[in-house]
Each structure stands twice: as C-alpha cells, then as structure tokens.
Image: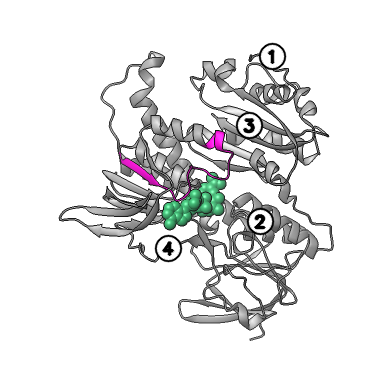
Amino acid sequence: MAEESFDVIVIGAGPGGYVCAIRCAQLGLKTALIEKSKTLGGTCLNVGCIPSKALLRSSEFYHQTLHAAASHGIKTGKTSLDLPAMMKKKDEVVGTLVKGVKTLVSKKGVTVFHGNAAFADASSVEIEADGKKQTVSGKNIVIATGSSPVELPFLKFDGKTVVNSDHAIAFDQVPKKLAVVGAGAIGLELGSVWSRLGSEVTVVEFLPRVAATFDADISKLLERLLKKQGLSFELGTKVTGMKKDKKTTLLTAEKDGKELTIPADIILVAVGRAPNTEGLNPKAAGVETDEKGRVRTIGGFRTTAKGVFAIGDVIAGPMLAHKAEEEGVALAELLAGKAGHVNYDVIPNVIYTEPEVASVGITESEAKERNIETRVGKFPFAANGRALANDAPDGMVKVIADAETDRLLGVQILGQNASELIAAAVSHMEYGGSAEDLARTIHAHPTLSEALKEAALAVDKRAIHSL
Ligand code: NAI
C-alpha cells in the first residue's frame, strides 16, 4: 500500500502541536497529527495546566469554606473533604476539554494518528501502535513532543513515595506530610493544593527565594503570604536524597553546611522539565539536539534537517503552553508562505497560587543587569477598593518603565486574579506602550485593574490613592 503523504505532519498533540495542526489546516495545508497517548491535549490538558487549575479552584473553595466563610457571615455545618469527588470533578473538566480538542481537530480537517512516531528519514515517519507499523510522509514535519518532569538521580520517581506532578494531581488520599522539592510554578501550585486540603507542606528550594524569576520584593511577599497559609519553606537548601526511618521517610538536605532531615509521607519533585525526544529517532532525520537535549533550532523553527521544524517545550525558551501555541501558529503561517512571528519579549508568566503572581517583560533586577535605567511604580492592593470588597487586600502591582523613554519594560502583579490582570499589561507592551499610556487608560471602577493604572501613575510619583 502506498504511504499516505501530507503537506505537514505534526508530531505531538499538546497545545503547540494541535494548535499548529489546526492553523495549518485553516491555511489549506493537508495536515496529519500524530499522538502517542489515547487523548489529545498533551501535558497541559491531561496532567498539567488544566487539572492543576481545577484542583486549585476546588481546594481554594474548601479552604475558604473552612477559614473565610464565617467572616462573610456565612455559617456552614461541619465541612469535610470528599477527595474522590474533587478528583472526579477535575477529571470531568479534563474529559470535556480533551473531547473538545478531538472534535476541533477533526472538524478542521486534520487527520489524527494514534501511536508512537519515529523518524525513518527527514521526510517520513513510522507510526507504531499495538505492535502494528505504518509510515506516513510529509513535505514538512513538525516536532512538538513537549517535555517531562526531571528526575533527580538520588530521588527516582516510584509514583508512591517519590512522585512528580503527574502523580500529585491524582493522590487518592491527602498526604499527612508532603515535602516538595523546588519552589517554582509546580512546587508552589501543587504545594498550595495539598496544604489547603490538610497536608503539612514543606517546600525545599535550592535558591534563596521562592518563584525566583520574579523580583525579590514580589517573591519575598509571596513567600510571606504562603507561610501565613501554612506552607513552610527551607530556602537556600540543597536536597541530597532520602532515607527511611523506622516508620517514616526522611528527605535529606543540606543548609549552611548542616544536614536537614524533613519527614515526609510523599516527596514531590518539581525541579523543572526536560524535552521529550526519546523514541523519536531524530538522528535518522539529521535533527540535532543541544547540550540540554532540546531540539536545536536555527531560526524560523527550522532544525538542522531540511523540512523538519520544532516548537514548544522541546526547543529552547520558557516551557509554557501559550509560548508553544504561539510558535505553532507562527510556524503554520511560515509554512503557508506567510509572515509568522513570535514576540518573545512579551510572554506572560503566571503562578496560580492564591494570590496569583504574574509577570511580563523584564524584572527590575534584569534591567539593572542590562544597565537599563528604570523608573518603577508600585501600588498595593490594600489601597484598592475592589480588593478590599473582595477580601483580597494582599499583594501589589509593580510597573517598570525605561527612565529615558517611559516605555514599559515589565509588569509584575501579585494579587487576586493576577493571571487575568496581566493581559492589559501584555497588550500595552505588545504595542510598545509607555507607563504614561497605561496611566491614561480608563479602567472601570471599582476593579482590581485600577491598581495597574495606579502603579503606572506611581512611575511618575502621581498615584492618586496611595501616599
Ligand atoms: P521551575 O523551573 O519553574 O522551578 C523549579 C525550581 O526548583 C527552581 O526554583 C529551582 O531553583 C529549584 N530546584 C532545582 N533543582 C533543585 C534541587 N536539587 N533542590 C532544590 N530545588 C531545586 O520548574 P517546575 O516548577 O518543575 O515547572 C516546570 C516547567 O513547567 C517550568 O518551565 C514552568 O514554567 C512550567 N509550568 C508552568 C506553569 C504555569 O505557567 N503556571 C505551571 C506548571 C509548570
């Protein structure tokens, strides 16, 4: 039988791959999408962004019912946790979304193959499923195989005592003591979920502060707020391994030259993710990888093999679903002869703790490193009417502008709904806006977004509602 051939074959159906496939099909390219899992949507929909957000919402609901409802004049009876029901709700959200992606992809005219894809050469791919193999060929092949949790050599994942984020979104009971290695997005989000549900959570972080991609004032404030919620932190601490006591497991670590032992029923390792190229046989196509195992790209998402491209977590850059999606769209447009482009300077970044923390552009300390003179405006949510009405006075907005041109260089928001609020800053920055532009934009009253306007006013020391 002749092999089926396509204009574009996309390998991997995460947010990078499926979005790229849809955009290719929209542009009239005959497109195939190959996915080794049973469901589409990749890490983000199945075990990442979406299930974690569902659990964050449910656990916050539980926590608020226990700790905040009474202060709003709401009397509840005895509140208890039904973890299987909470997990079922999360699974339903995931189920709805993956079904939605399946429908979207097929209605847009993309041909889906399920199975493991391996390069035969630079223009054909072998798909293996249930012991059967078939080969498809493509004028263009896109690698969008994503990433997987990094394992520490002395803390191997066993899915029971030492786990990664895939496991930590599906515990069947609340661990009494949870040790989390890494105070990045995954550690803080899943640490928050299980802390709210009753675990004693200790987060161990190598660096001297949490959420280290944010400025120190923001991450220090976040740390303080999370501590108030019950999380403990061991910062500036190097994890060295684990040992078993008679009854308990102890995470071992080193801080200031001294050994620390942290008792834990479960250890969640959240120290980053590594690109997925295993089983893909990139060498057969002449696709090179770099020192971190990422597919090497040489501009325009091209790899070292002609006709082979790569996007998303498997290449350099932040491992974020929206970065992958944008690359997928840009690549599809380039393949269709259009001008695809990604503005890497304006990619928002969010950690969905409560309060959330979000940023775009560069931090104040990055500006210093680059010898860029800045003017900085800050505004606390404690001075924002809506934040007080929402019982969410914690956090602040920080606007960083170029001292000479007033152009917005970066914005960081620690506060309720920061993930949504950052979008306005992203838009202003996308169009090269200044702090003055943001300050003169009308924001509805009363909204949390007024804090963004006030922080922009504060760049010029003229915030209205703060001293
Ligand atoms: P991360 O890179 O965000 O954070 C890992 C943290 O672990 C860092 O602070 C690092 O200093 C620390 N670390 C590394 N080795 C360590 C060690 N041996 N001992 C103690 N600490 C150590 O990685 P994370 O949280 O695992 O997330 C993986 C990727 O997924 C990231 O690129 C992240 O941006 C992305 N992601 C994004 C989310 C979002 O947008 N909200 C949610 C979840 C993940």
Given residues 1 and 275, the one toward you in this image is 275
If you read the primary sequence from the N terminus, does the residue marked by circle 4 or circle 3 appear first?
Answer: 4
Q: Residue at x 67, y 25 (%)?
A: 455
**In the displayed structure, does residue 171 sit left or right of residue 425?**
left
State the residue lying farthest toward the left. 246
The vertical placement of 315 against 212, above or below, is below
Q: Residue at x 71, y 45 (%)?
A: 346
| Amino acid at pointer 2 | Val
Q: Quadrant of residue 433?
A: top right
Is the residue at mark 4 in contact range of ligand 1, meaning its CB lies under 8 Å from it?
A: no
Residue to which mark 2 is pinned: 19
**In the displayed structure, does residue 460 sit left or right of residue 261?**
right
- Magenta region includes residue 206: yes
Image position, residue 20 (x, y; %) = 68, 59
| Amino acid at pointer 4 | Glu
Q: Residue at x 39, y 41 (%)?
A: 233
Query: How dense is the environment of label 3, judged by Cα within 10 Å: few (below 14), some, or many (20 and up)?
Result: many
Q: Magenta segment range?
A: 199-219
Residue to which mark 3 is pinned: 421
Q: CA distance from mark 4 to mark 2?
A: 29 Å
Label 4 SS: loop
Is the residue at mark 1 in contact range of ligand 1, meaning its CB lies under 8 Å from it?
A: no
Query: Which mark is drawn over residue 464?
Result: 1
Label 1 SS: loop
